Image: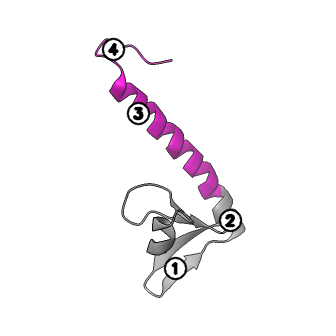
Amino acid sequence: MDQLLADGKADAMGPFEGSPIRYMNHWWRQTEQGWVALDESATSQLDQQAERYQAAMVTASRRQRTPGTGATPR
């Protein structure tokens, strides 16, 4: 899975330990036995969480670049 990430063929939800990986239309998680594809329900839920996480990261990034006026960027 590390090589798939490096090649841009898979995407991690975020830069944190244990982050699920999106590959071939499913989310995967690492277990002691190896990588396991999650079922459709879990994949759907993680797709929603990934959208929220990405939106939060964009918002946080914009706030860091805004001058110290305390204003929220538009």
CA neighbours of label 4 inside 10 A, class few (<14), some (14 to 19), many (20+): few
69 in relation to 44, above or below: above
Label 3 with label 2: CB-CB less than 8 Å: no
Question: What residue do we see at 56% from left, 71% from top?
Answer: 28
Identify the residue position indicated by label 2 in the image.
25
Sequence-wise, the earlier of marks 2 and 1 is 2
Within the image, what quadrant is residue 27 found in?
bottom right
Q: Residue furthest bottom?
A: 33
Distance (Cα) linking label 3 and label 1 = 31 Å
Three-letter amino acid code at the position of disc 3 = Ala
Instruction: Identify the mark at residue 60; answer none if there is no mark.
Output: 3
Distance (Cα) linking label 1 and label 4 = 44 Å
**Segment colored magenta:** 45-74
Q: Is residue 35 left or right of residue 70?
A: right
Identify the residue position indicated by label 4 in the image.
70
Q: Is residue 72 magenta?
A: yes
Within the image, what quadrant is residue 32 found in?
bottom left
Percent position of residue 41, x then y = 69, 64
Question: What residue do we see at 45% from left, 18% from top?
Answer: 73
Sequence-wise, the earlier of marks 1 and 4 is 1
Distance (Cα) linking label 3 and label 4 = 13 Å
